[in-house]
Image (cartoon, rainbow, N blue to C red):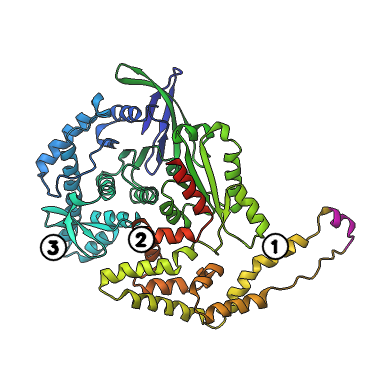
Amino acid sequence: MDWFIPKISGDQLEISIEVGEQLFMVGANGSGKTALIQNFVTSQPNDKVRRISAHRQAWFQSGSLDFTAYSRKQFEQNNMNWDRQANARWMDHSPREKQSAVLFDLVAKENTRSRNIARHIDEQNPEEAIVLASNSVSPFKQLNDLLELGTLTVSIKNFNDEEILAQRRNNGLSFSIAQMSDGERAAVIIAANVLTVEPGTVLLIDEPERHLHRSIIEPFLSALFAQRKDCAFVISTHEIALPIANPKARVLMVRSCEWTGDTAKAWELEVLESNTDLPEDLKLDILGSRRRVLFLEGTTKSLDLPLYSTLFPDLSVIPKGSCNDVIRAVKGLWGSREFHHVEAFGLIDRDDRPEDEIEKLSEDNVFVLDVCSAEALYYCSDAIAAVARRQAESLDRDPDEMIETAQKSAMKVIQEIGLAKRMSAKRCERQVYNVIQSLAPDWRQIKKSGRQLHIPTVNSPYADELTLFQKFAAAKNLDGLIARYPLRESSVFIRIAEALECNTRKNYERMVVSRVREDEDLARKLKQRIEPLSNLLNTKQKNAS
């Protein structure tokens, strides 16, 4: 689908939007992003566009199915006409009916799938029914999987084609979808719209971050894109982390627009191709007033991202690759403060750095974890206890017994033959490397050395490290072991998740993030484990308020 956008300079910007692609539209308030979406709607065929407006109604009157097939068809025609009117830029026509329509579509798609499977059974073609069932997914299952990926604790179900109900995952309690939280409703509305469109549709989502926590919206949108690879997406957003989290997407930078009366006629804009860093002037436009960014090691798939996004919801948390990439990003932003209002901080792994280096890095707002990895937070005693309490409540079990079982299961792995030696040697690997690197000759020494290089003998820390591991193990100090050793290379974390009846590590880790969001005491305890960064951020937050 081709989009021709008039530019203030007098020419046109041509953008081709293909199925499977995402285009993020970013710019300051008042730059004309919503007007540009309106331009797209009026310049494209009605049946190939679905708009989810920024001023969308974020609540349901009820979960009742008020449409018939005939009235739903009539409403669709009316809605396409309303969408092309100029006032659709700021006015949501028939918002209640729109929400009812998307619920009807969800049930209709579910029923169509069921009827097609049943038809093969009736025609005595069970093999065809099995193939169809395996090659298609219930839209309600798709929607609930998306909600779970966003660490939301609610699921949606169809009650006899008469009403859509919500259900709490922890206790099975059902209630009207009208009673869901703002964030839960916002997620359901976006997901249901996306899941029910026809293949080949271009979905225009204006400000998807409304009512949704930053730690939810990034994985939630990525999962939506994955579910509808047969569609294209145009996303208008103020959340700079979204295009950064989707580096394969293009970015349309909207800087300003010209108006004739109430109608935008031309724009100043440009396209930033995929895998290109956003320029600093755009960051200023989007972020506006002072904004804080936390850079982490790793990628958008790293375990650190959802946890730190939830612990520090007032920050943009951005994975930056290696520790050197984090250090460069933080220093670069602080070194160009005259051009923007961004406060940048970094969090990197310790990697056996000496204390003087750690102190120097902290002066540059780069802080070093005093633990082996993010798993030390996910699987610390505080996190295990929080998940155990939630699981015990849901399963009608004793939380203390579940905690004890988890600890015993972990310690059983710790006692496995060979694990202490392997973990101790792994822990020493970086230490030895750093020592050898510090003793390695420079080019001047190499030049003078002739045919042989003389490198001093290095004392091995292995024996002392093994003694320390055994000391932790004898004391059943699980926190100490997880904080110091790369136990992700063992089955310790899997056994903890299974003992707490989370089945998989992934489920357990999602539950930890969910508990951090809901449990202020757990969030406080985890922040204490990453001082002094959390102390600095809290101090700045108090000063800002």
Q: What residue appears at the point 46 percent right and 31 percent down from the top-left corner?
A: 285
Task: Give the mark, 1 or 2, whose residue is nearer the N terminus.
Answer: 1
Question: Regarding mark 2 in the picture, which secondary structure is present there?
Answer: helix
Q: Quadrant of residue 508?
A: bottom left
Q: Which quarter of the figure is the C terminus placed in?
A: top left
The image shows residue 119, relative to residue 28, as above or below, that is below
Q: Position of residue 473 (x, y in %)?
A: 53, 79
Q: What residue appears at the point 54 percent right and 55 percent down from the top-left corner?
A: 532
How would you rate the neighbour count of disc 2 (Cα within 10 Å): few for under 14, some for 14-19, many for 20 or more? many
Q: CA distance from mark 1 to mark 2?
A: 38 Å
| Residue type of the residue flagged with mark 1 | Asn
The residue carrying mark 2 is 515
The residue carrying mark 1 is 434
| Residue type of the residue flagged with mark 3 | Asp
Q: Position of residue 373 (x, y in %)?
A: 53, 62
Q: What residue appears at the point 35 percent right and 59 percent down from the top-left corner?
A: 519
Task: Give the mark, 1 or 3, whose residue is nearer the N terminus.
Answer: 3
| Residue type of the residue flagged with mark 2 | Arg
The residue carrying mark 3 is 122
Foreground label between 2 and 3: 2
The image shows residue 197, relative to residue 399, as above or below, that is above
How would you rate the neighbour count of disc 1 (Cα within 10 Å): few for under 14, some for 14-19, many for 20 or more? some
Q: What residue appears at the point 10 percent right and 41 percent down from the top-left corner?
A: 70
Labels 1 and 3 touching (C-beta < 8 A): no
Please state the extent of the stretch shown in magenta in the rendering.
444-451
Q: Position of residue 105 (x, y in %)?
A: 19, 46
Foreground label between 1 and 3: 1
Task: Give the mark, 2 or 3, whose residue is nearer the N terminus.
Answer: 3
Q: CA distance from mark 1 to mark 3?
A: 70 Å
